[in-house]
Image: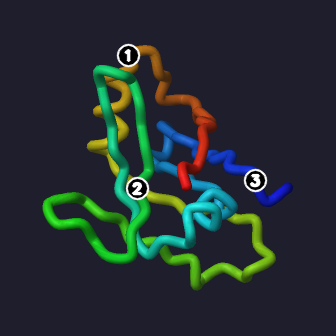
């Protein structure tokens, strides 16, 4: 991976009601202490916002990268039935028996 690689990977696991963000993605985001999921239903767009503290009026999720060894390629998991149901309603064609891998870019 070169220094200009800004690819981001996230998995949405509908069967287990979780979002899995790859550790490399969090590292590219600057190892944030908190993340917030942002959804734009009109554009069918999802974003992950990283911050060092919870944002006022938002639903921030604590990131616990400390638990994992630095050489680990594991992911961080977040659970939210509410967000998953909103995504399924927005997209309309997702099956709860499957996981969906999403790719995008880290905006630096």
Residues at marks 3 and 1 touching, judged by CB atoms closer than 8 Å: no
Would you call the spot at circle 1 few (<14 residues within 10 Å), some (14-19), or many (20 or more)? few
Say which element carries label 3.
loop
Give the x, y percent position of residue 55. Answer: 24, 66
Density class for disc 3 (Cα within 10 Å; few <14, some 14-19, many ≥20) is few
* Image quadrant in which the N terminus is located: bottom right
Please tell me the numbered disc located at residue 58: none
- Up-down relation of residue 75 to residue 46 (above or below): below
Mark 3–mark 1 Cα distance, whole angstroms, equals 35 Å
Name the foreground residue: 73 vs 5. 5
Work out whether mark 1 precedes mark 2 in sequence or the reverse, and give the earlier one.
Answer: 2
Q: Residue furthest top?
A: 93
Q: Which residue is mark 1?
A: 92
Write the residue at 49% across / 49% down.
Answer: 19
Mark 2 and mark 1 in contact (Cβ < 8 Å)? no
- Residue located beneath label 2 in the image: 49
Identify the mark nearer the N-term, 2 or 3.
Answer: 3
Disc 2 packing (10 Å; few <14; some 14–19; many ≥20): some
At 72% from the left and 82% from the top, the residue drawn is 69
Above or below, 56 against 94 in this view is below
| Mark 3 or 1, nearer chain start | 3
Give the image's coloring scheme.
rainbow
Where is residue 53, by image quadrant? bottom left
Horizontal and vertical percent position of residue 17:
43, 45
**What residue is pinned by disc 3?**
4
Q: Position of residue 43 (x, y in %)?
A: 36, 22
Say which quarter of the image contains residue 97: top right
Q: Depth-wise, is mark 2 or mark 3 nearer the camera? A: 3
Q: Which residue appears at 63% of the width and 57% of the height?
A: 25
């Amino acid at each position: 991976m070169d220094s200009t690689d800004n690819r981001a990977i996230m998995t949405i696991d509908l069967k287990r009601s979780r979002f899995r963000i790859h550790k490399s993605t969090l590292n590219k985001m600057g190892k944030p202490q908190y993340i917030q999921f942002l959804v734009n239903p009109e554009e069918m767009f999802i974003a992950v916002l990283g911050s060092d503290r919870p944002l006022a009026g938002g639903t921030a999720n604590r990131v616990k990268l400390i638990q994992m060894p630095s050489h680990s390629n594991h992911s961080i998991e977040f659970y939210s039935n509410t967000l998953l149901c909103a995504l399924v309603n927005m997209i309309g064609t997702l099956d709860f028996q499957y996981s969906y891998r999403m790719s995008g870019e880290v905006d630096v």
